[in-house]
């Protein structure tokens, strides 16, 4: 185990994510594992430190919602801080992914338009769109973006976002108020395209996931608190694990890693046991249990928070000794 990994597992965010692993696992589609989701979520927090200042409830709810929709944080969806809340935002790749799930779409494309491009379109009963990008390096300022969908039955539809539309959307977006938002960087074109994709998504055959994500995105854009179908309560559960469950959890540690009891609880003992299991290799855990008389059949001991903390500290002591 590397020193970086040990330090990471002392991070309270790791403990928080481990605490809600069971809730996240319960909503995941088959192609995602809870371990992968938790790792990606932790990396997202590392990249955006202000997420640490958000309420834990909003952060966990956002992670659960992204996971439930089969999207991936940092690729097809993002979690951004807004005041004290963590907000779930799908990007254009996420909308397109969800639109394809309807089974009624052949292609879903989008492009930014610059002032030196040859671009024109017509609405109405004979709608069409034409775009020939300028071949020069400097294409001028960003002036529009569009999305085009081709249906399996042969028809098509498109949506155009012009500068006035984009500015209005940006003004309403809470994420646009942060300096590192794509709205304020050289990637602003992606937000124009996303706006076109999202508007067009409302007119394509929708899966339940697409409907839900579009609704949540609109709430975020309006600065409203997002309402999730499977939202957790801030208190989550007041049920505490029994002494027998704690004993079983510790006795299993080091035996091929064992299995930590997955209970929706805030009990700090189980959180520490989860950290021990994930942070240290089996030989270190077994040695620490033996040194502290935690081994199976070693007699009666109080499974208190302090006792479990001593086990973690002993594992750390052995690990540091092995490095020397």
Image (spheres, rainbow, N blue to C red):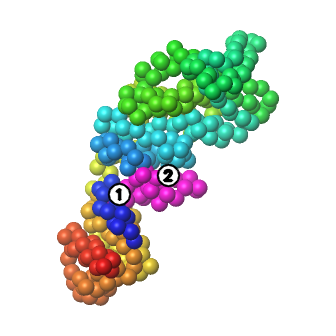
> Magenta stretch containing residue 35, yes or no?
yes
First in residue order: circle 2 vs circle 1: 1
In the rendered image, is residue 321 in sight?
Answer: yes
Between 237 and 104, the residue placed more toward the observer is 104
Tell us which disc is closer to us: 2 or 1: 1
Residue 1 picture quarter? bottom left
Residue 187, how many percent across, how many down? 51, 32
Q: How many marks?
A: 2
In the rendered image, is residue 277 in sight?
Answer: no
Q: Which residue is mark 1?
A: 14
Q: Which residue is mark 2?
A: 27
Determine whether the residue tagged by mark 2 lies in a helix, strand or loop. loop
| Position above or below: 2 against 227 | below
> Magenta stretch containing residue 272, yes or no?
no
Horizontal side, residue 52 vs residue 214: left or right: left
Horizontal side, residue 66 vs residue 128: left or right: left
Label 2, label 1: how far apart the Cα atoms are: 20 Å
Residue 12, how many percent across, how many down? 29, 56
Determine whether the residue tagged by mark 1 lies in a helix, strand or loop. helix
Residue 17, how many percent across, how many down? 37, 55
| Position above or below: 139 against 258 | above
Residue 324 picture quarter? bottom left
Which residues are the magenta region?
A: 15-43
Mark number, residue 110: none
């Amino acid at each position: 185990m590397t020193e970086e990994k040990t330090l990471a597992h002392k991070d309270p965010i790791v403990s928080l994510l481990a605490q809600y692993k069971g809730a996240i696992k319960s909503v995941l589609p088959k192609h995602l594992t809870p371990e992968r989701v938790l790792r990606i979520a932790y990396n997202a927090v590392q990249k955006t430190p202000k997420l640490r200042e958000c309420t834990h409830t909003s952060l966990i709810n956002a992670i659960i919602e992204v996971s439930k929709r089969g999207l991936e944080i940092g690729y097809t969806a993002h979690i951004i801080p807004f005041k004290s809340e963590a907000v779930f935002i799908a990007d254009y790749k996420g909308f397109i992914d969800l639109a394809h799930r309807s089974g009624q779409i052949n292609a879903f494309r989008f492009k930014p338009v610059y002032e030196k491009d040859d671009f024109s379109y017509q609405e109405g009963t004979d709608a069409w769109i034409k775009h020939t990008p300028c071949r020069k390096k400097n294409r001028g300022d960003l002036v529009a973006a569009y999305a085009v969908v081709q249906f399996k039955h042969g028809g098509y539809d498109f949506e155009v976002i012009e500068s006035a539309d984009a500015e209005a959307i940006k003004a309403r977006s809470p994420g646009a108020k942060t300096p590192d938002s794509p709205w304020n960087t050289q990637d602003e074109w992606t937000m124009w395209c996303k706006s076109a994709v999202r508007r067009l998504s409302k007119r394509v055959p929708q899966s339940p996931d697409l409907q839900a994500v579009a609704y949540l995105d609109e709430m975020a854009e309006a600065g409203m608190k997002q309402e999730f179908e499977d939202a957790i309560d801030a208190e989550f559960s007041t049920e505490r694990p029994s002494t027998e469950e704690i004993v079983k959890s510790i006795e299993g540690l080091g035996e091929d890693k064992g299995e930590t009891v997955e209970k929706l609880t805030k009990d700090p003992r189980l959180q520490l046991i989860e950290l021990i299991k994930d942070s240290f290799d089996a030989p270190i855990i077994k040695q620490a249990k033996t040194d502290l008389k935690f081994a199976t059949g070693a007699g009666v001991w109080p499974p208190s928070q302090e006792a479990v903390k001593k086990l973690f500290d002993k594992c750390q002591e052995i690990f540091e000794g092995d490095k020397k």
